[in-house]
Image (spheres, rainbow, N blue to C red):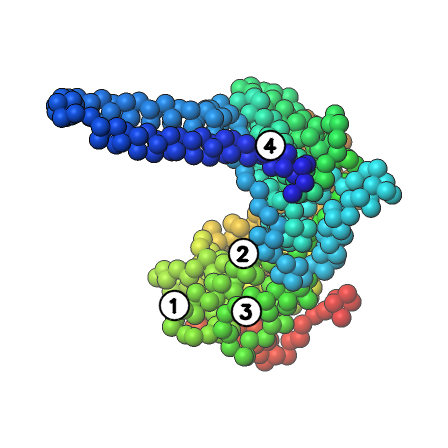
Amino acid sequence: MNSKKMKIFFKLHWIKIVVVILSVVITTSLITFIIFGLNEWGTVDAITKQRTIAGFPFQFYMMIVTGIIQAFLFAVMWLYIMRGGPIRAFTQTGKSAVKGEEIGVRWDDVIGMEEVKKECIEVVKLIRDRAEVEKISSQILRGVLLLGAPGCGKTYLVKAIATDSNLPFLAVSGAEFVEVFVGVGASRVRKLFKQARDLASLEGGCIIFIDEIDAMGAQRGRDFGFGGSSERNSTLNQLLVEMDGLKGKSENIVVFAATNMMENFLDPALLRPGRFDRKIYVDMPDFEDRCKLFLYYLSKVSYSSDIKIEHLAYMTVGNSPAEIANIVNEAALISLRDKRNSVIKKDLNEARERIALGIKLRIKMTKAEKLRVAYHEAGHLLVTYLLVPSKDVFKATIIPRGKAGGATWMVEREELLSRDKFALLGEIKIAFAGYLVEKMKFGITSTGVDADFKEATLLAHNMAWCWGMGKSGHVGNFEPTETGRYMWAGLHGELDADAKDIIHECMAESEDALKKNWDIVDRLATTLFEKEEIEFDEIECIFKEFGKERSRSEEAK
């Protein structure tokens, strides 16, 4: 260990060294005193010994009192020396560094996300080859921001980066720096970066990971009372200074941060070059990635050979890696509960439905209610099958789950980054189908249409007000601004009329399809009423009996 490392090591651990030395000195002195006392006791005459023994009870009690006082003083000194006292203990982060190799997350453990992995591996090379980077450019990598939906693997990626770089790793949460008392968060940021600088000097670099950075990195604003906003602002200001401020020497410290929020939610000063120099977008897994994820997690359990990985990947469009892991884990628990040695296809289907909709509730429904729910779901099923070619119906059920009396399980055939007008209109047609069937069959409707109505009316409103899809041809986002003012306030009536037209046209098209194919609706509802659940194959067979094929748009062909 060279002199520089010895200096840094002593700087980090001097309190522990002093305490150890003092403990050794005190213990040695105590042992010496006892040995010396025993030797002297042997040279004392009998009369002196008798007097000493006679006064022993008083001396014994005095020793106990003295010991208690000494223990109290030691505790106070330990609190102020080792912990820095109550005030410092309140402001410190209390984070201990973890060596990268101790985390143990290898790149092989990061399933899928090949493009993102390549970018992260490049980041590791930049951290390792700091000297080479400085020869080419004076600006080194300071921060990397990972953005994506929950459960996509942002934290897992940072763990793999820390393992590969084998540098000290300090992980914190953005919420740990936010307090009601102004200055506490800023103090914690200073202490965190001071610890990182010491570790970087000792080990050649350090990685700081701030999870959920939106808790401390939101856009700065006015203080409306009690110092809450001022505390958040001062904490963020300190982070900005530590990342790229008035610091003399630049250490090999790289800050990684992750958030589920939109990029524009964060303060612009955080996102400028010199702070978070690089942004990595972690998306939902595609079909191939989902296949790899199911293979990876199923390899950890025993499963039946008839399980088709491609089928599972197809059924989980839009699911994150965390959700896929949860499906496999839940399926294993269901298999264990049913006393089977391996996971079967039924377990995975049950797990997926349980996670998405909740556990089955064996509520005793009346025949009338059960029949109504069966017709409601049959309406959703028929309209989806005949009018929405971009979706497949995998299952319909009238067994209550959570707050739903029944459900129709629909899955997109392909991953979509955005939805066009036809896809949105299809969603509205499906949503109103249950209401229309109830009205056509029973003459009245029920509260089961509530969630469908909310979804449909919100989509129609946004199509007219925000996405320029109304008949009137008005293009723009006309929602009220942050100040509450409307853009082009005179257009309210026309935009509302556009939304109403969208709803009425979708309802008319769904109603027409239901009337023309009412015999199929009856058959679907009767089968659901009797069996309570019907799967994809049986649904296909019913439509084929009536000579119906899936309609496909040109894009879907």
Q: Looking at numbered disc 1 in the image, what kind of residue is underneath it?
A: Arg
Q: Label 3: state its secondary structure.
A: helix
Earlier-in-chain disc, 4 versus 2:
4
Q: Is residue 45 visible?
A: yes
Front position in the image: 52 or 185: 52
Quarter of the image for the C terminus: give it: bottom right
Q: Looking at numbered disc 3 in the image, what kind of residue is underneath it?
A: Leu
Q: Nearer the viewer, mark 3 or mark 1?
A: 3
Front position in the image: 55 or 131: 55
- Where in the figure is residue 339, as x and y percent of width and height? 38, 72
Whole-number angstrom distance, CA of label 4 to CA of label 1: 55 Å
Q: Looking at numbered disc 4 in the image, what kind of residue is underneath it?
A: Lys
Mark identifier at residue 337? 1
Q: Residue at x 72, y 50 (%)?
A: 124
Q: Looking at numbered disc 2 in the image, what kind of residue is underneath it?
A: Tyr
Earlier-in-chain disc, 2 versus 3:
3
Mark identifier at residue 298? 3
CB contact under 8 Å: marks 4 and 1: no
| Label 2 Cα crowd, 10 Å radius (few <14 / some 14-19 / many 20+) | many
| Label 3 Cα crowd, 10 Å radius (few <14 / some 14-19 / many 20+) | some
Q: Give the residue pinned by disc 2.
A: 435
Whole-number angstrom distance, CA of label 3 to CA of label 1: 18 Å
Whole-number angstrom distance, CA of label 2 to CA of label 3: 40 Å
- Where in the figure is residue 240, as x and y percent of width and height? 70, 30
